Image: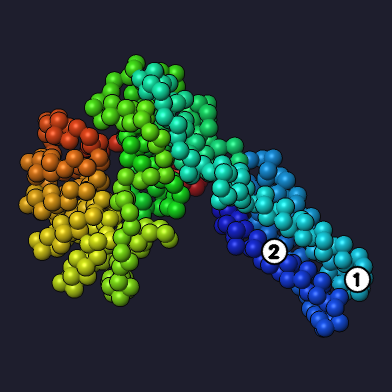
């Protein structure tokens, strides 16, 4: 485990030789002018530190390569280029010490080329193929490609025409040819069925117990949520189609017409036949932009151990996590109420709130996601929440709510995901709730993981 710990320093260390050696090159070029002649005294030191940090980067990079998460061809080329940088910088140090200025000139040119190529290969391993050009107009950008409409969604092969393009847009960057985080590839049927280093990620016929679906369903603030924060996310429609495909048996050859289609799926398939669907659009984010929130209000909330931030750098919509807030008070409620125009994601796990606090939450009219698991939310409080007509995601796991309480929200046609595991809702209630919320996925929990013998170790006492 110590080698894995050391390997994780590579992303930090790798930037040191780049900066130091670029500085050495600039010093060398400037020192050729009499005006900057004194910089010659700093050149040997810069090359020495550059060589040492380059060697350290090579060592940590070699250890990190053992994770098996990267394309072998690109990785090997990146490694050898890194080694050449280390040797070239050491050569630059020797030449600068012997005042061999002519040879040092060619070393500096070689180093500049090597640093550029090595850095580009490193960026490819980290961010995916073609990452450098994605911001240019007309360049292929997986996060912003508009999917072409399907002429006849009922005749479409579900995996090839619907699921595979979805995975390509949202997952290939980290789980395809160039990079395989967690040892997982999702760019072919064989790789999907093989799974990652922790085993299978998909259980045909059971989407709710499939890791690939569970990860995209996690709260975006959770560390294990996929795709990672800052990456293009799956829309509610895409999550719905992924769930349908896996739950229907994850067949790689069937057409849509050969699979059962609930009303929500028929609507989703029909939408694929219409105008182009931009895959980066998130249904759990409002159209347009919000006014910027008061910095003083946000700072005050953060003093109460509340994590609050803007959804992205280009947006003023807010998400807040109260997991570390031990006690609510009138000031917190007042400050939260003042953010009703910006707040769209709210996470309050384990919250024990007064009726006034639930009324405050019900006043956050733009709220799209509410995670109230393990809280003291009651059926009466749900009646308050029913006023949130934009609410799409509701987590009520391990609460006292009943089916009658949840029925108070049946007029909300925006709800697409409701988590009701470990509540007072029975299996019989579940059937009526499915009728009341035809567009929503009702997650009742109760997942079971397969027993894997290698997960168990038997310890024998010393003899």
Picture residue at 45% right of the left edge, 26% below the top: 161
Of residues 411 and 374, which is closer to you in this image? 411
Picture residue at 71% right of the left edge, 44% below the top: 76
Do tag 2 and tag 1 residues touch (Cβ < 8 Å)? no
Using residue 357 as the reference point, say whether residue 209 is left or right of it. Answer: right
Q: Residue 453 at what x, y percent from top left?
A: 44, 33
The total of numbered circles placed on residues is 2
Of residues 429 and 267, which is closer to you in this image? 267
Q: Residue 361 at what x, y percent from top left?
A: 18, 59
Residue farthest top in this picture = 258
Using residue 166 as the reference point, say whether residue 37 is left or right of it. Answer: right
Circle 2 is placed at which residue position?
Answer: 18
Which of the two labelled residues, at mark 2 and mark 1, occupies the earlier sequence position? Answer: 2
Q: Residues within 10 Å of mark 2 (few under 14, many from 20)?
A: many
Q: Is residue 198 visible?
A: no
Q: Residues within 10 Å of mark 1 (few under 14, many from 20)?
A: some
Of residues 393 and 146, which is closer to you in this image? 146
Cα gap from disc 2 to disc 1, whole angstroms: 21 Å
The colour scheme is rainbow
Kindly identify which numbered label has been placed on residue 101: 1
* 217 up-or-down from 193: above or below: below
Q: Residue 360 at what x, y percent from top left?
A: 15, 62
Question: In terms of image quadrants, where is residue 419?
Answer: top left
Kindly identify which numbered label has been placed on residue 458: none
Picture residue at 12% right of the left edge, 41% below the top: 411
Using residue 299 as the reference point, say whether residue 91 is left or right of it. Answer: right
Q: Residue 449 at what x, y percent from top left?
A: 35, 35
Picture residue at 12% right of the left edge, 60% below the top: 359
Instruction: Tell me the element at label 2.
Output: helix
Question: In terms of image quadrants, where is residue 115?
Answer: bottom right
Instruction: Tell me the element at label 1.
Output: helix
Q: Is residue 89 visible?
A: yes
């Amino acid at each position: 485990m110590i080698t894995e710990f050391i390997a994780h320093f590579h992303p930090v260390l790798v930037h040191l030789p780049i900066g130091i050696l670029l500085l050495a090159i600039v010093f060398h070029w400037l020192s050729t002018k009499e005006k900057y002649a004194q910089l010659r005294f700093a050149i040997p030191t810069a090359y020495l530190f550059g060589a040492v940090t380059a060697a350290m980067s090579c060592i940590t990079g070699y250890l990190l390569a053992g994770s098996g998460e990267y394309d072998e061809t690109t990785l090997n080329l990146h490694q050898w280029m890194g080694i050449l940088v280390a040797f070239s910088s050491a050569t630059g140090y020797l030449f600068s010490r012997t005042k061999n200025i002519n040879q040092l000139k060619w070393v500096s040119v070689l180093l500049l080329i090597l640093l550029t190529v090595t850095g580009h290969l490193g960026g490819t391993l980290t961010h995916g193929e073609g990452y450098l050009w994605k911001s240019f107009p007309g360049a292929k950008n997986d996060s912003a490609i508009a999917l072409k409409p399907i002429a006849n969604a009922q005749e479409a092969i579900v995996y090839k025409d619907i699921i595979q393009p979805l995975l390509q847009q949202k997952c290939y960057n980290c789980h395809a040819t160039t990079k395989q985080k967690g040892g997982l590839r999702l760019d072919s049927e064989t790789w999907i069925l093989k799974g990652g280093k922790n085993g299978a990620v998909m259980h045909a016929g059971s989407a709710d117990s499939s890791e690939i679906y569970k990860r995209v369903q996690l709260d975006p603030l959770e560390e294990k949520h996929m795709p990672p924060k800052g990456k293009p996310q799956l829309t509610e429609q895409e999550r719905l189609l992924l769930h349908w495909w896996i739950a229907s048996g994850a067949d790689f050859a069937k057409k849509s017409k050969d699979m059962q289609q609930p009303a929500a799926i028929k609507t989703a398939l029909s939408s694929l036949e219409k105008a182009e669907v931009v895959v980066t659009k998130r249904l759990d984010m409002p159209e347009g932009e919000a006014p910027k929130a008061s910095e003083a209000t946000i700072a005050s909330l953060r003093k109460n151990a509340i994590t609050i931030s803007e959804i992205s750098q280009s947006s003023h919509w807010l998400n807040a996590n109260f997991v570390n807030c031990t006690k609510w008070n009138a000031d917190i409620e007042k400050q939260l109420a003042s953010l009703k125009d910006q707040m769209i994601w709210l996470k309050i796990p384990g919250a024990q709130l007064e009726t006034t606090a639930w009324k405050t939450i019900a006043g956050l009219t733009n709220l799209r996601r509410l995670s109230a698991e393990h809280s003291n939310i009651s059926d009466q409080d749900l009646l308050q929440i029913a006023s949130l007509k934009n609410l799409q995601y509701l987590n009520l796991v391990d609460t006292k709510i009943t089916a009658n309480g949840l029925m108070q929200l049946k007029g909300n046609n925006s709800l697409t995901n409701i988590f009701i595991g470990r509540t007072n809702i029975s299996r019989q209630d579940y059937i009526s709730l499915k009728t009341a919320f035809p567009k929503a996925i009702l997650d009742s929990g109760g997942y079971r993981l397969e027993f894997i013998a290698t997960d168990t170790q038997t310890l024998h006492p010393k003899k």
